[in-house]
Image: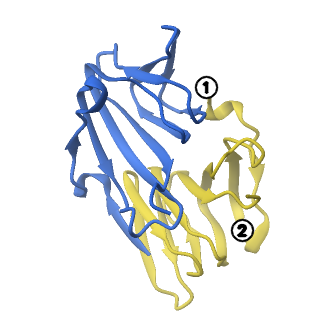
Chain colours: A blue, B yellow
Amino acid sequence: MKHFHYTKIDENKVDAFGSTGTTIRVFISEDEAPNFIMRRFEIKPLGQIGLHSHDWEHEIFILNGEVVLINENGDREKVSSGEFVFIPPNEPHGYINEGNETAAFICMVPKQTK
Amino acid sequence: MKHFHYTKIDENKVDAFGSTGTTIRVFISEDEAPNFIMRRFEIKPLGQIGLHSHDWEHEIFILNGEVVLINENGDREKVSSGEFVFIPPNEPHGYINEGNETAAFICMVPKQTK
């Protein structure tokens, strides 16, 4: 068993998809994880993760703040602390933090190197 | 995309392994999840999940409170809010809440019906 506080994990800037004000911490490496990876994201106020898609799902739990989820049609759905989010494979999605506090969420993905 | 607050999900008592004071909410069904399942547990003060093991891993994030993790040797490790926990496959583990507040955590498992 291993355990550690999230602040002990390297925090890296997310640059992909024109993202701004966003960081990621990966809790367990692809080498160690048998099946899936748990990551913790933070998006500062006015920060965003640009629209993108991939052939794997996201399972998300919002820890703090609120995030607006957008899709390829420009539809917007606000989710906030305590909410679970499921984004199916191949569904375009982006994130914007329009609130006044940093948003934080857990985002799980299947391991890519099985 | 689907999203909902955790309180909208059915909360069920955990009876297995001699558990007491513990409930589970399952965020997405085995039928819908492509690869893994996200669950939210609550353990009341003095509640516990008895020692058990299985051939799949746990990836856990502690949301609130603190939990004492125990193993088959009686070793004890306290984990608290903001901590990530990885329990490898086949490692016996149990949980006790010795604190004064309800502990809550996300616990991910691979889908069993692939």
Left or right, A63 with reference to B72: left
Q: Which of A85 and A103 is in front in this view?
A: A85
> In the displayed image of the protein, which residue is found farthest to the top?
A74
Displayed quadrant of residue A3? bottom left
Looking at the picture, how far across and down is residue A82, in whole percent? 53, 33
Left or right, B95 with reference to B62: right
Q: Which residue is drawn at 30% across and 48% down?
A: A25
Looking at the picture, how far across and down is residue B25, in whole percent? 69, 46
Looking at the picture, how far across and down is residue B78, in whole percent? 41, 69
On the question of residue B65 being in view, the answer is no
> In the displayed image of the protein, which residue is found farthest to the bottom?
B73
- Residue A72 against residue B88 in the figure, above or below: above
Q: Which amino acid does label 1 sit on?
A: Met
Q: Nearer the viewer, residue B55 or B6?
A: B55
Q: Residue at x 25, y 36 (%)?
A: A14
Q: Is mark 1 on a helix, strand or loop?
A: loop
Left or right, B78 with reference to A7: right
The nearer-to-camera label among 1 and 2 is: 1
Looking at the picture, how far across and down is residue B91, in whole percent? 56, 81
Displayed quadrant of residue B22? bottom right
- Residue A61 against residue A6 in the figure, above or below: above
Between the C-alphas of marks 1 and 2, the distance is: 34 Å
What number is the disc on residue B19?
2
